[in-house]
Image (cartoon, helix red, strand yellow):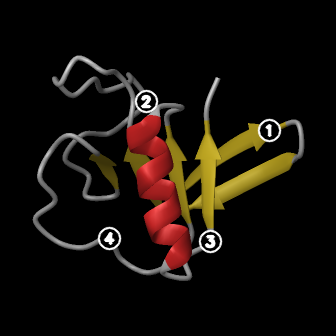
Amino acid sequence: GYAVDTTRGRVEARQVVVAVGGTGAPHWPAWARRGSGRVRHVFEPMAAPLPDGPLIVVGGGISAVQVACREAEAGRPVTLVRR
């Protein structure tokens, strides 16, 4: 899984959606293990739906907020991490 330490404590999740960069081309941070199946980029097609369980969305733009809201409305625990 993944863990993010914040000023409010640690957040853990098995799934991460990366939603950073507004260029239209996916930007992959160095820590994101591309192709692991547990880290996906919002600008790449998702072949399968996200598995159930807590989700961390990394990014502060509208795409990140939309993903976080959609998943939270579906009843998933979601943490949005931004700068």
Q: Which residue is mark 2?
A: 31
Q: Which residue is mark 3?
A: 77
Q: Is residue 39 visible?
A: yes
x 62%, y 39%: residue: 81
Proximity of marks 2 and 4: CB atoms separated by less than 8 Å: no
Residue 36 falls left or right of residue 6: left
Q: Amino acid at mark 3?
A: Pro
Counting residues from the N terminus, which is met first, the one under dot 1 or under dot 4?
Answer: 1
Distance from the alpha carbon under mark 2 to that under mark 4: 20 Å
Q: Residues within 10 Å of mark 2 (few under 14, many from 20)?
A: few
Image coords of residue 70 (percent x, y)? 44, 66
Q: Which residue is mark 4?
A: 50
Proximity of marks 3 and 1: CB atoms separated by less than 8 Å: no
SS assignment at label 1: strand
Counting residues from the N terminus, which is met first, the one under dot 4 or under dot 3?
Answer: 4
Vertically, is 54 above or below 1?
Answer: below
Q: Amino acid at mark 2?
A: Trp
Q: Nearer the viewer, mark 2 or mark 1?
A: 1
Q: Which residue is mark 1?
A: 6
Distance from the alpha carbon under mark 3 to that under mark 1: 16 Å
Residue 17 falls left or right of residue 12: left
Image coords of residue 17 (percent x, y)? 39, 49
Residue 9 falls left or right of residue 34: right
Distance from the alpha carbon under mark 3 to that under mark 2: 22 Å
